[in-house]
Amino acid sequence: MKSTGKVIGIVSNLVTVQTFGPVAENELCYITLGNTRLLAEVIKVNGDKASVQVFESTRGLRGGDAVEFEGKMLEASLGPGLLSSVYDGLQNDLTTMEGVFLKRGEYTDPLDHEKLWDFTPLASEGDKVIAADWLGEVKEGWLPHKIMVPFSFKGSYTVRRIVGPGSYNIDTVIAVLTDENGEDVPVTMVQKWPVKIAIKGYKEKPRPDRIMKTGVRVIDTFNPIAEGGTGFIPGPFGCGKTVLQHAIAKQGEADVIVMAACGERANEVVEIFTEFPELIDPYTGRKLMERTTIICNTSNMPVAAREASVYTAMTLCEYYRAMGLRCLLLADSTSRWAQALREMSNRMEELPGADAFPVDLSAIISNFYSRAGMVILNNGQRGAVTFIGTVSPAGGNLKEPVTESTKKAARCFYALEQNRADQKRYPAVNPIDSYSKYLEYPEIQQYLDENVDKGWVERVAEAKNLVLRGKEANDQINILGDDGVPMSYHERFWKSELIDFILLQQDGFDPIDCNSPMERQKYMLELVLDICRKEFSFDDYEQCRAYFKNLINVLKQMNYSAFPSEQFDRYREQLNQISA
Ligand SMILES: Nc1ncnc2c1ncn2[C@@H]1O[C@H](COP(=O)(O)OP(=O)(O)O)[C@@H](O)[C@H]1O
Ligand SMILES: [Mg+2]
């Protein structure tokens, strides 16, 4: 028996419902409005009253309107066909819709039920299995998509029957499992999972032990993110958060990409729609979209749907991780999500925390970030969810609650700076404030030592130190004037400029410079450090400036040249002549 209720209060998307029968937090309900039914989620229960947030406009809703509770939480449908889809936060399929606007009360099915998939069994009759074990495989694009024992199955099962190789749709019963009580349960290629609960289905979740390459030097060289790691990009409006995240999406070393786009500007979502389907995967030469799912909020959706989208996106990643794949989740921007939490909390007249955000904001953000990670599956294989979110602090103030809470939750910090963006020093990541805590992990240090180069971590620290010393020298020059400081200050400053222009800055729109492979990053770091290690004896600071400007020009040309190539070698030769 489903519980029912009736509307007794409406404040925008927050509706108070008088309930008849038991209702649980996070449970879904439908509110009848004329001929349509609006989906809503219970966010608070107090005696026989429930506060529910409606995922749509509540225009026209009235006191007394009927409510029907569903007895289940917001769930994602998981099965083959998720990749190359564009969904909203409730997993409505936006690709098949006329434009992106669904009518109020319209919900679509996220998966194609007709499409046939070539199934290959991976389990045999008589096998003992538990939740998340692989029963079979279909090819989704070119990726192996595992059909798993549903995550909700508790205890152990015996495979009683499994279909042979063949083409089936997602609703076909591909296996019958017998539980510990001798009951038979059918398994199809689609399963459901509540988005707010993390999918377990793995043996252990150890610390990440390798890096995920992005082709972006400020990340890979200076502050690498681990495979299965977490990072965030705070930055004021227009500083390059979206451009940087898109670069990571295009170039990141991952099997599956999920983009949660809670657009800051309306046209950003449109850009994703038009730009992403055209992108070519640098690893396979096929369409990047073949291994991407986009979850975006359309402008006509209320705040509540923004909250759902990050959870749905994370659930999809966890699902693919359970198949032994490396997933990359990008959320832009998580501030929108936090604002949704704030709006709801304020409407419920809860006791507010800092800046009127809910008091448990920090816990909500930490819980979400902790769903990322590298895991060892029950069969010993690895899977990973790497998560990078952007934060847009109001007025660029990094002390505001969302940034502070995210800083506690994420292990990499890529602070975009207005000042650097104004100078067109892109990506505008501040080299001094930014960090990667993974660099301190012994297992990551060992990985870099063995896979990039011996002594790599020390060399990176040396470069960072040069940047810091250059900044100090520059501060002195600014106070005392060009003539008021010793020559060594100018030299120090220009060495840091060399690192800035050649290693930190990277043209996100140049076809070669945008994506820098690790071999190339290693070569350039060495080259630049070799120059920085030299002691020069310039006659005056004009000479020093001219010398370094010359060097920077040539090295920049190298960044724009293919590596290796004759052109690259010619600039290398030119560089030798300058430094001779
Ligand atoms: N790596 C980059 N290379 C070149 N231009 C960039 C780069 N990053 C940002 N920009 C410039 O800055 C503009 C704003 O970037 P965007 O990512 O939209 O900012 P945000 O998402 O922080 O509001 C871009 O349209 C582009 O002109
Ligand atoms: Mg943006």
Image: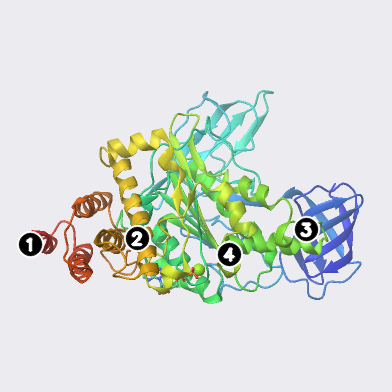
Alpha-carbon neighbours of circle 2 within 10 Å: few (<14), some, or many (≥20)? Answer: many
What residue does disc 3 label?
352
Q: Secondary structure at mark 3?
A: loop
Which of marks 3 and 2 precedes in the sequence? 3
What residue does disc 2 label?
473
Cα separation, mark 2 vs mark 3, equals 45 Å
Circles 2, 3 touching at the beta carbon (< 8 Å): no
Q: Is residue 413 left or right of residue 492?
A: right
Q: Secondary structure at mark 4?
A: loop
Alpha-carbon neighbours of circle 4 within 10 Å: few (<14), some, or many (≥20)? Answer: few
Which of marks 4 and 3 precedes in the sequence? 3
What residue does disc 1 label?
577
User: What is the x, y in percent for residue 313?
Assistant: 56, 54
User: What is the x, y in percent for residue 514?
Assistant: 31, 63
Q: Amino acid at mark 4?
A: Asn
Q: Amino acid at mark 1?
A: Gln
Circles 1, 3 touching at the beta carbon (< 8 Å): no
Which of marks 3 and 1 precedes in the sequence? 3
Which residue sits at x=39%, y=61%?
247
| Residue 495 at least partly seen | yes
Q: Amino acid at mark 2?
A: Ala
Circles 4, 1 touching at the beta carbon (< 8 Å): no
Q: Is residue 526 left or right of residue 208?
A: left
Cα separation, mark 2 vs mark 1, equals 28 Å
What residue does disc 4 label?
397
Cα separation, mark 4 vs mark 1, equals 46 Å
